[in-house]
Amino acid sequence: TIYPEIRIYEVGPRDGLQNESKFVPTDVKIELINKLAGSGITNIESASFVSPKWVKQMSDGPEIMKNLHRKPGVNYPVLVPNLKGYNIAKECSVEEVAIFPAGSESFSQKNLNCSIEEGLKRFKEVADQAVKDRLRVRGYISCVVGCPYDGPISPKSIAKITEELLAMGCYEVSLGDTIGVGTAGSVRKLLREVLTVAPPRKLALHFHDTYGQALSNLLAGLEFGVSTVDSSISGLGGCPLCTGSKAIGDRFKSNNKILSQMALCDI
Ligand code: HMG
Ligand code: MG
């Protein structure tokens, strides 16, 4: 098999650090981002412009984006959940924003405090504005394989959200196995469906390694020609609003039986 060249999209300063219980000082975050850029990485998701009431660790997005040394040729995207976050991010001269609907109803409620449909409506407002402002927009879908509350997620529903994100103007959709319950088998089933609505070059793989499956899941993705891979320095990361993602928050109890059953089957 000849594998395509890999494009790395590093999310450590955002997805990695958002889950740290102790506040990481802003200058340390900036130093990490600068060092990642220095190492040759050209896509570095650097901050979130989410509600500080929900994720305090990410409350210093504006300071980070204003004080960062922006290396020419390096892309420094940020995560935004709504127009409010978008407007603050835009004031910080960001060039790319990422929007992130959920693939499951319960996770949408826990992570965004709204339904999938309402989330897509809000993200469309963000995407429309970004397109008008000529900013790039990347889409994420979380819980693409399984949800800590709702269990397995149907590949068809993820394909539908992928299609909607691309129609909004996202240049790429990153498929997020937020809690790491994917296996090579379930990833193949997912991609067979998603590839009916999007070519491989419009997709990225975002695999959390909760059950040690991320590498085999990536290999399954590569075999379908999907070659953009989200990475996180030192394997840091997780979503603070769910369990099963090496989460610290544990604000909402998930069904751990669902998680372990999913992780053990369908290889
Ligand atoms: P809400 O509480 O329903 O929102 O949260 P609200 O509009 O009622 O606002 C509540 C307060 O937050 C208000 O302040 C707003 O002004 C403020 P108050 O009036 O009470 O003083 N606020 C904001 N402040 C700054 N920036 C903003 C913003 N928005 C509201 N953008 C909301 C709804 C969507 C805001 C909230 O649920 C939220 O911020 N969620 C984000 C959660 C998050 O960051 N999760 C982790 C990232 S997703 C992830 O990790 C998955 C991924 O990696 C892929 C994968 O792994 O699969 C991407
Ligand atoms: Mg993630």
Image (spheres, rainbow, N blue to C red):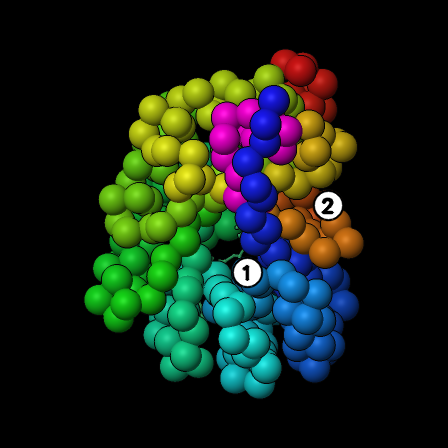
What mark, if any, has residue 231 been given in the picture?
none
Residue 126 located left or right of residue 240 = left
Q: Which mark is residue 43?
A: 1
In the picture, residue 39 is in which quadrant?
bottom right
| CB contact under 8 Å: marks 1 and 2 | no
Q: Position of residue 194 (x, y in %)?
A: 40, 28
User: Does 173 sit above or below residue 12?
Assistant: above
The one of 82 and 71 positioned closer to us in this rendering: 71
Which range of residues does the magenta coloring cover?
218-229
Q: Residue at x 26, y 49 (%)?
A: 168
Q: Locate the N terminus by quadrant.
A: top right
Out of 131 and 264, give the one closest to the viewer: 131
For the residues labelled 1 and 2, the Cα–Cα distance comes to 24 Å
Residue denoted by label 2: 246
Q: Is residue 162 magenta?
A: no
The front one of 158 and 67 is 67
